[in-house]
Amino acid sequence: MFVIRVLATAALATLSLGSAQAQPAAPVQVINLASYSFSPAPIVLHAGIPVTLQFVNRAGKGHDFTAKLFFRSARILAGSVEGGEIELRPGQTANVTLIPAAGRYNVRCSHAFHNMLGMHTTILVQ
């Protein structure tokens, strides 16, 4: 009887440990960078809910996604954000998983003249 109790307790502990470690993946929000535009526009996210932002440069030239205040306000869980921007070569994809903070944030491409040519949008975190 003692052996059965020990085995049952070990089995339950293993099940509990497995479920505590298994967390659902954050939903993915694709953000497309094209020559002089971002889409979707605006970018709408939910405050306090983890999301993976997948940045896809669909252009034949480099672009960046610069949103310093947004990234500073968010809790970054995975991925790299240097100085509040994501730099992408032509055709490159990058992922950043984060928990956004409520607010309205400006986004732009900081490459010469790209912002002036219309490469800017807003992130709305509700």
Image: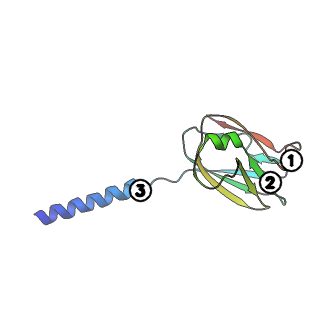
Marks 3 and 2, the one that precedes in the sequence: 3
Amino acid marked by disc 2: His
Marks 3 and 1, the one that precedes in the sequence: 3
Left or right, residue 12 beside residue 78: left
Left or right, residue 49 beside residue 124: left
Residue 102 is situated, as x and y percent measured from the top left of the image, at 61, 34
Residue 43 is situated, as x and y percent measured from the top left of the image, at 69, 41
Residue 75 is situated, as x and y percent measured from the top left of the image, at 57, 45
> In the figure, 112 relative to 12: above or below?
above
Tell me, yes or no, whether the two marked residues, 1 and 2, touch with CB atoms within 8 Å. yes
Instruction: Kindly report the distance in space between the C-alpha atoms of the residues bearing marks 1 and 2.
Output: 8 Å
Which quadrant would the N terminus be assigned to in this image? Answer: bottom left
**Label 1 belongs to which residue?**
114
Amino acid marked by disc 1: His
Residue reaching furthest front? 83
**Label 3 belongs to which residue?**
21
